[in-house]
Amino acid sequence: MIGLIQRVTQASVSVDSRIVGSIQQGLVLLLGVEKSDTQANAQKLAQKVLRYRVFADDLGKMNNSLVDINGQLLVVSQFTLVADTQKGNRPGFSRGAPPALGEALYEHFIDAVRAHIPNVQTGEFGANMQVSLVNDGPVTFSLQC
């Protein structure tokens, strides 16, 4: 499971020109599910996203997590994160989870984070989405579990 987190001051995701999720201060997580992933991977990544220290403390150091600041989370499924880009000029998607497994683990991840923070917004799995955000910093990290 691959997650790309971006610290944001605001973000939203739209489907067919309709906003389906939006947040203020927090993280946008682009989530890719591989065919070898399990619920344990989703749980581990959920804990990492919630506890990853990317927000400033009183001294301006990145010592606070999403939980520490009571921040918000916007989760967007993105199968292209698991693409094999090693050869040629066209990505390969053989590592990606089949849609049913991908959606089940995406939903499991969302349930896992919602158990710890109240404001979790999402995109629509499998939809063509437009993501708008103001990256704060910019601060962006790739996480794998």
Image: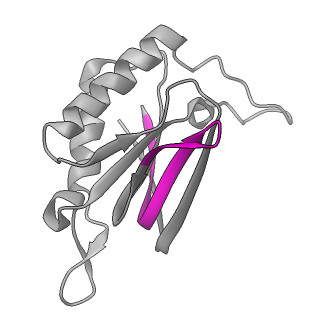
Q: From the top left corner, tell me how far across and down residue 65 is, in percent.
A: 22, 62
Q: From the top left corner, tell me how far across and down residue 4 is, in percent.
A: 47, 48
Q: Residue 15 lies in magenta, yes or no? A: yes
Left or right side of 30 for 52: left
Left or right side of 122 for 63: left
Compared to residue 33, the image places residue 137 above or below, namely below
Compared to residue 76, the image places residue 60 above or below, namely below
Say whether residue 11 is visible.
yes
State the residue in front, 57 or 123: 123
Quarter holding residue 7: bottom left
State the residue in front, 20 or 145: 20
Q: From the top left corner, tell me how far across and down residue 73 is, in percent.
A: 33, 51
Q: Residue at x 30, y 30 (%)?
A: 109
Q: Residue at x 18, y 67 (%)?
A: 69
Q: Residue at x 38, y 26 (%)?
A: 106
Left or right side of 28 for 16: right
Give, as a single range, the part of the protein colored magenta: 2-21
